[in-house]
Each structure stands twice: as C-alpha cells, then as structure tokens.
Amino acid sequence: QMPRGNLETIHHRALVLSQVRKWLDSLKFKDAFECMRKLRINLNLIYDHNPKVFLENVDTFLKQIASVNHINLFLTELKEEDTTKTMYPCQSTTLGTPSAGGSQSKVDTVCDALRVAMETSDPKRYCLSILTSHVKKSKPELEVALQKVHELRVNPPTEKSTVSAEEALKYLLFLVNVNELYEHSLGTYDFDLVLMVAEKSQKDPKEYLSFLNTLKKMEPNYQRYTIDRHLRRYRKALNHLSKCGEEHFTECLNLVKDQRLYSEALQLYPPHSPQYKALSCAYAEYLVEQQQAEQAGLLLWRCGEMPRALQAFVSCCSWRHALCVAAKIPLPPNQLALLARDLAVKLMELRRYTEASVLLEQYAKDCEEAISALIAGAAWEEALRLIYMYERQDIMETDLKPALLEAHSNQMSFLEGQKATFIRHKNRLSVVRELKEKARLELLDEDAPDCPDSELFSEASSMITASATGSKYSHSNSRISARSSKNRRKAERKKYSLKEGSPLEDVALLHALTETLYTVDKLREEVHSLLKALVLFGLDSQAQKLQQDYGEVLLLMEASIPEVWPEGQQQSSVPVTGPNSTANSIMASYQQQKPSPLVPQQGLYKCTWDGCPFPGP
Amino acid sequence: QMPRGNLETIHHRALVLSQVRKWLDSLKFKDAFECMRKLRINLNLIYDHNPKVFLENVDTFLKQIASVNHINLFLTELKEEDTTKTMYPCQSTTLGTPSAGGSQSKVDTVCDALRVAMETSDPKRYCLSILTSHVKKSKPELEVALQKVHELRVNPPTEKSTVSAEEALKYLLFLVNVNELYEHSLGTYDFDLVLMVAEKSQKDPKEYLSFLNTLKKMEPNYQRYTIDRHLRRYRKALNHLSKCGEEHFTECLNLVKDQRLYSEALQLYPPHSPQYKALSCAYAEYLVEQQQAEQAGLLLWRCGEMPRALQAFVSCCSWRHALCVAAKIPLPPNQLALLARDLAVKLMELRRYTEASVLLEQYAKDCEEAISALIAGAAWEEALRLIYMYERQDIMETDLKPALLEAHSNQMSFLEGQKATFIRHKNRLSVVRELKEKARLELLDEDAPDCPDSELFSEASSMITASATGSKYSHSNSRISARSSKNRRKAERKKYSLKEGSPLEDVALLHALTETLYTVDKLREEVHSLLKALVLFGLDSQAQKLQQDYGEVLLLMEASIPEVWPEGQQQSSVPVTGPNSTANSIMASYQQQKPSPLVPQQGLYKCTWDGCPFPGP
C-alpha cells in the first residue's frame, strides 16, 4: 500500500491499530491477521498485544488462521522485540502486562506453544509449520527437524494431501543453509538422513560417500566419537570414546588433555579404576601448570598418589594437607621434622609466623624456634603461652623484651612517617584545590578587569604546566619507612600524577590520603596487642608514648576528614560541566568523584580508643 | 569623632587605613598608633597588618609607644581575630602572609614577644604592662603575675617613679575578679601573697585567717595537698599527698579512687612497693567494672596477684594470658585441664572454635573433643591435621563426613535464601522506583490533561500511605535461615521502612540489598574451604552443585549492580530539589544518596571464581 499523504496515513494507521487491538481483544485472530498482512503491520503484535491471552487461545488462533503458509509467515516473522513498546506503543498497555514467558525467550515460548497445539490437532497437516517452529527457536533444533523428515521417509504418509519427505527436506533447505543442515544430520548418527541431505547439497558424492563408508565400518561408539570429533562436539566425543574400552584409553586421555575436559572425564570412570587415577594425575599436572597446586594435591591425595600430592601441597604452602599426606605415606620422624622446618621457612617468608610456629613446635619439636617465629611475627600473647607451656621463661629477657622494644620503636617511626605523609599531602591538596578554583574562576571571569590576583594566577598556571620540574614530592616519598614498601610501590605506579603540578595531582593526593588513612586505621589491632605486651613487661612509658602518638594520629585524620573529603564535594563540582569548562576540567572533576566510594564514613574513628590503661598526662 | 555624613566618613576611613598601612610598613608605629587611637581603628591591625614585621620590630614598637598606658591599651585590645580578614580587608595582603605564630595563639605570641622586650629593656618601668601581658594570655598566668607583685612587696623598689606592690595589686584587681585572684594566690602556697590579696577582697578576715592558720600548722606537703584539694587541683593534690608518707596512704588511695587518678598514682610509687600493688589492685577493680577485664588482668599479673589475674583473664576469655598465669601459680594438672575445658566452652560460645581446640588438645589432652570443636567450627583442614596427627582416622567416617554433608546442605539453603531475598528486594525496588518516578512526574505535570496514568497513580499514592497494612515483607523476612539472625535483627530494627509502602522503602531496600550482597560475598572463603573438603572426600556432585549455585548467585548480584546502584543516580536525583519538590521528596532524595559509600565498586566480583576443580556442566 502506497502512502497517500502524511496526515492521512498516520490517521489511517492509528485507526487500523486500534481496530486490530479490538479484534485481538475479542479473539478475532483471522480478521486481525488478514488486516495486518495487508497493511504490513508487524505480526509480532498478535502476541505482544496481550501475551497471556494469546497463549491461552493458541488453539483458537490455529483454527482461525488454518493456512500452513500463514502460520509459517507468523512464525518466521517472530522477534524477541516487544512491538507494543517499540513499533506500536500504546499508553494504556505499558503497565500491568509483563511478558507471560517470564525469563524464557518470547520466540521460544510462541514456537513451543504453537507446536504443541499443531501436534495435538493434526501433525501431518501442519508438518511444515512444525518444522518451522523447530528451526525458529533461539537455539534451532535442527536435529529434531531432520529426525521428523527422516520419519516421513521411513514411513511415507499414505494420504496424498500430506507432505512427503522430499518436500519437507526442500522446505528445510529453504529455511537453513545446506552445509549447516549436513553437519547436523551427521550429528544424528543416522546415515540415511545424512545421505538424504547430502544428495540435496552441492557436495562431491565420492567424498562424502567414502567418509560415510569409513564411518559405517566402525564400532558404534567409536563411530559416534569420530562424528562428534569431526563436528567439534568434544564433550559428546569424550562420552562415546569412554565407552570404547581400555584399548582406546590413551586416545581418550589425549582428547581430555587437548580439550581440557578433565572434570567431565572423571565423571565417566568409576573412582577406583586405573583410568580414574590416570585422569586425576593428568588433571593434577594441568592444575599445577595453572598455579592451582592445592587442587592438584587434593586430586592426587584422593587417588592415592601420596608422594606427588605431598609435593603439590608443599609447593603451595598448603601445610596442613601436606602433613596429613606425610602421615599417610608415612614419613619417618626425622624426615617429617625436616619437612616441617622447610614448610615453616616458607610460611615465615609469607609472614605467616603463627602457622610456622605450630609446625616448629608440634612436628619439628623445637619449641625454641617456634617461640622465635612467634616473636618475629609480633604474636606476643601466643609467644608468652609457649614460653610458659615449655617453662622457658629465660627467653622473655633474652628475646621477647628486646623484640618488644624494637617493635615499639619501629611502630613509633612508622606512625611518624605516616603522619608526616598525611600532613604533607593534605597541605598540598588544599594548595592544589585553591589553584584549581582560581583557574576555574578565571575561566568564568575572563573579561573581568585586571585584579591583583592576576599576577598570582600566572604563577599558578605555570606551576600546573611545569610538571617536569616538580620532583620534590617524589623525593620525599622515599622517606616513608621500609614497612610501607607495598604502599610505596603503589605510589610509584601513580608517581606521574603525584608529581607537583601534574594535571590530576589532586586526585592522586586524594588517593594517597585515603590509603594512608586506611593503613593507619588497620594498625589498631597490632598496636593494641603491642601495648598490652609493653604494659605486662612494665614498659609503661613506652606504652604511654605509643598510645598517645597513635591516638593523636587518629585524631588528626578524623579532624581532617571534613576538609579532605568535603560532604558537598560532588554537588559543588557539578557546575564544572558548564559552558565555560574545558575538556580537562570536566575530566578532572569526573576523576575527582571517582574515589567517593572510598570516602570513610564520618564517625568511623569516633569509637573510644582504649589501648592500654595508661593515658597520657 | 562624630560621623559627618556617610560619603565623607567612608572616604576618610579608607584613606586613613591606607595611611596607617604606609606608616606600619615604614615602622612608624607611633604615628600609626596615635591615629588609630583617635579614629578608633582596632589596634589589632598593628600586628595583623604584617605579623612577621611586627614581631621582628617589637623593640622599635616599644620605644616609639613608650607610654605604659598605651601599651596596656594595645595589650587589652588584642583578640585572636585577624582584622585584615574581618574588619579591614585589603586585597593585596590576603595571600602570602600567613600568621607568623603558626599554630600558637596570636594573643599569646604578641604578649610573650612584648614581655620579653619589656623585661630586657626596663622591667620596673613596664611593671604594669608586664602584668597585663601575663593576665591577657589565653591561659591567664595569674600565679606568675601574683608572684611578681609579691616580689615588689618583699623588695620594695627604691626609686619613686616605679610602681609599688600596692599599686600593682590594685591594677591586677582592676583586670581580674578578686575571688579568682584569691584562689590563685592560694595556689602559690605563699601565705603572704594570700593575705595581701585577701585584704583587698570583701572576705571576712576571721574566716580566711583561721583557714590560713590551720594550713600553716600542717606539714608542708600535706599543707599543699590540702590547698590543691581545696582548689580541686586533684593531680597536684595527689602528687603532694604521695610525699606525706605511709600513714597518709589510705587517704591517698581514697583520693585516687574518687578522682580515678589510677595511672597518675602508679607513676608516683616504685613498681615493687606495697603501695604500687594496692593501687594496681584498686585500678584493676575499677577496670573490671569498666568491662576491661583484660587490662585488669595484666595489672594484677604485673604486681603478682596471680589468682585474681587468672579470674580477670578467664572472665574476658583472654585464654592465652589465663594459661600463662595458671602456669605461674602453678595450677595442678587436673585443675589446669578443668580450666582449659571451661575456657574452651566459653570460646565455642563465641564461635572461636579453633582456639577452643588448642585448649582441648594441648591442655585438656583430649584430642577427640579438640577435633569435634574444629568440625563444629567448619575448620576442616585443621580437623584433618589433628585426625592424622593423633591417628584417629575413624573420626573421618563417624563425624567429619556427616558434618561436611550437613554443612553443604546448610550452605545450599542459606544461599537459596539469600538469593530469594535479593531477587525479591530487587524486584520490589524497581516497582517502588517506578512509582516514585510517576509521582514526581505528576507533581511536575499537575496541570496536564487527564491521562490514562491518573488511575494508576492514585493507586500508587494510596499504596504509599497505606504503610500500616503492608506486612507481606516483614513476614517473608522470617524465612531467612537461622544463620542470618544478625542480619535479621538488623532488618527488624528497620522493619518500619522495609514495609511495603513506607515512605523511604526504596532506601531500606537499597540497604537490605547491599547487606545481602556483602553477606554473600563474605562467604567466599567459607565456601572455598568446604569445597576443598568435599572434593577430598569424593563428594564431587555436592561440590559441583555448591560451586555452581554460589557462582550463579555471585553472577546474579554482579549483573544486578548497574540496575540497583545506577552510576548516574546522584546526578539524576539533583533536580528533585526543584521548585516543584515537597519537603518529603527532598528528604527522600537526600536519604537515597546516603548509602552511596556502600555502593560496591563495579568489578569487585569480576575476579574468577575458582572454587574447586569440578566446574558445572
């Protein structure tokens, strides 16, 4: 139908849609369908208008439409899109009618509903529509469709009116690419079906016939494996190959390794079979390569490969498992002690001192080393427990007390460093913010008369551009104590932006400040435990100093929160995206908002800090 | 000076200020001072104009001003306020001249600087100004001022021109309230001084004379203690009382208890004295009352009160310390075992199963109970370690495996519950948001013609007000498994707002969703450890199901993040504070922004979930 002037067409379509809706509401599908077909209204509307009503009246729809061609037309036009929302919106229906299919695909819902109706009423008559409903699904069910064609061939219909296998296949080929259909016919393992499709294709008969003949000679499971492999359906291939007996196990193992189908393969063999063990070992090897030695160890343990399991557990410091396996081997006592010492060394490298001490104490039977490990790990209470358990009070004076004093002085200088960094960054942040604000005002105020600030501002802008020279802060970073090396590495990654004058220096400063704040806050427990130990040893003045310093740093940080992370920051930075903003300023303000999830909640540090019973004077 | 018409005065003042600044810049303090005094310009400007220059030229200032009265005028007019910023702002000086005093009070800085200058040049001549400089400090140094008056009395000046003690005291009384001065004179412990002030006061001589006579009869330290106590200077009182010998120790102990000066008192006695011990015990009692039994225990341990220390440590489950003290008593083996069992029961009540197992294994020597504790605490690896260490593999079948299966089913149903809650809240949130958006649009669109939505909206608004009836969600909350009882309690506290239709339901839902998300995310480690144990015991299908379910819940939550916590939420809700908004809508939009720090960062859940080596099909 040609448009006959804009106004007329628009009115016409609106009226037509309203009429179509009325028809659909009164279940007059035939009228609606005819009209829509003529006026090229998308047929999806039949379903979309009211999915629930359509699904409840699929039989009525089928009876009214009757024509196989029309049903096919409807099916092929189906799309996931909801036309009541996109092409034909109508205010009164936008709410209250969610799609009836729930999370399932709309196309699948309609295809399945129609197919059920067609198969109940007259499967032979609707044969082609049924095929269409299989092919149109979001995952086309080509094998099922082919199977139905094959049935037609095996049991040709007696009535003349019904479709022959030949016609059905032709129709399928009209819907689906021939090569795809050939592959899927192979997938049914039905050679008659394959031949039927192959004959319709452009393929060379010599080629496919010899391939099919080779296949036909094979043992059924191996045959299916070969087809699956050809079709790259490796899971199915593995399943079939596993049924081909022991002589094919090597082939199976290779398939598993190639396609990494380890866990699938393990499910195909009984847990105590030699194949299961071989597969477990192969899987374990793979997992070790993938840096998952612990899981490898578990698999090896399960299948009785104890020495290899031990190796795997040791390599990933899964020390508890390693000791279990060692007990199961069983390792002689002297070797067990050696193993324990090895593991303890590894754990200490990972700063897991308390675990190392268990190994040294209970397996290497070396309480002295165990206590040393605990002291090195600042696990003061546990160290004391072992000292009293093994009656080694001498260690308190020789090792524990000096370690306490050293930990105290380390903690003090670390806190001092963090405090200095925080203050330096905070001060610099307020300078940078002031400069940026000035720059922003100047941008807004470009035609303002010469004001006394102009001189200052030119200095500010030259600072902003002179990013190459500002190395003062990267220098002072190195003053941070050795314990924050992790933080330093992080800082170095972002050094370019912490540099004085770098364009996003404020963002970098904000990040650095947040990091320092979290670092100091995380010390709480460590400081508390050190304070208790200091008090116990009568080192009251040291405890007092540490408690006071730590409390002061916490207070300083809490007091800085409103200044560093102002509450209204996000709102106030919105106008930056005004007409006078530059790409850089928008970018900067956007980046400035980014760390907001990191903003500590005010009051986080409000809890009373009760480190030790000796408050400062 | 009377104003002679607005324009003239204003011009006059601006010119005057400019002239004063010039004088100050050229160090003509005299001219500046005279002018400012006449025209009532705040004298603070003399310092504020350029603090650095003033402090460097205090001597010049002193020489030029010369008059004691003028100096006193300047000193008494000093305020912390920076007049160049408040009263006499001047653009050219706002930047680049931070106050020279740094963090110290400006008044204190000026007083101290002037006093030093006066005392160097002619202390006798400037006597009254020196007194003023003491009195004006942010913490008035009344004792020092009184001391100086007293010196004048003891060594009367020979020259006639200088001030007498009488005159100085009169001047002081002009600056300071007489009663305050009397109290401070007592604080000098100098009875001559007290009498001198008392004579000037309205006090009854009988009264203060008898008081002073009683004091005079006392031993000096006890005398000072009595005065300090009278003046409520308890720290000083304690200090003096501690020097009064053993016969006053009970009084001392009572003072310490009354004023809670425990830590101060401990510093006044040698650590091994009986007084130190008595004070420690008193402190410990106080700390126990304050729920700080661990600190009490440490104090008691330090001073050798072992049984009481043990009691304190046991009461707060400080089990390692308790064992140390028990070893020091020493407790006989059978009692130690009993103690260990007691502590283990307490620890298990606190869900600290691993610690309980150490007690049971090493002190109660009951490996079976120790393993049970570990199994109850889902510490699978540690349980296995003890099983192999004590060669109790029988426990694996009888206890460990059933516990694993139970943990698995608990975990599964917990996950299911969390998932259901999350989906329910999420769906409800989108409904509530839609209704709120409709309500907002309707407010903006009040004069719009009747539209089909109006019916829906009236329904929505009635839902919003019908908060009393919507109990559907508070019911379904109780379906959450017992393990989330903490979350449930939290939810109950906010039940009013999670109710369907409550005004801030969306905020409550957002909080609930965030909580569920964190709860599920925190399961990571627990699930991982359970998966490993399941795999080890060959319970592959259970492991697979758990891994799959957990992975799905994580995926579901990750996929929901953009919908539940939309990125642009904060910006988009800003227009709510437009002219058409109500107090409620503004409040709601404000509250909606509040939980933003809780918004999980996208990508938090992007790390690969490698629970166990058996991925689902």
Image (tube, coloured by chain):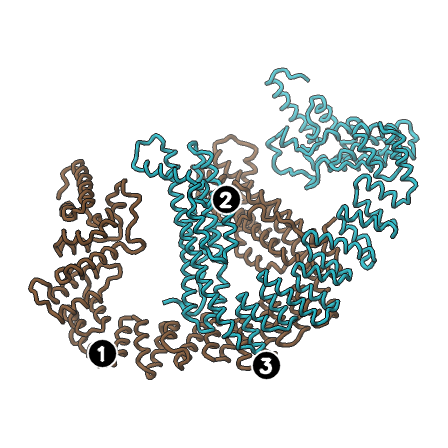
Chain colours: A cyan, B brown
A483, A574: nearer the viewer? A483
Tell me which amino acid carries mark 2.
Answer: Lys
Please tell me in which quadrant of the rendered image residue B245 appears: bottom left
Tell me which amino acid carries mark 1.
Answer: Leu
Rendered image: mark on residue B215: 1
Query: Could you say where residue B486 lies in the image, as x and y percent from the top left?
Result: 57, 59
- The relative height of residue B237 versus residue A346 in the rendered view (above or below) is below
Query: Could you say where residue A558 lies in the image, as x and y percent from the top left?
Result: 42, 55
Tell me which amino acid carries mark 3.
Answer: Gln
The N terminus of chain B lies in quadrant: top left
Q: Are marks 2 and 1 in contact (CB under 8 Å)?
A: no
**Furthest residue toward top:** A4
State the residue at coordinates (38%, 33%).
A444
The residue to which callout 3 is attached is B335
Q: Is residue B466 visible?
A: no
Query: Could you say where residue A453 lies in the image, as x and y percent from the top left?
Result: 32, 38
Query: Could you say where residue B240 lies in the image, as x and y percent from the top left?
Result: 30, 76
Rendered image: mark on residue A594: 2
Q: Is residue A34 visible?
A: yes
A265, A309: nearer the viewer? A309
- Give the chain of mark 2: A
Left or right of A340 on screen, residue A452: left
Q: Residues within 10 Å of mark 2 (few under 14, many from 20)?
A: some
Which element carries disc 1, helix, strand or loop? helix
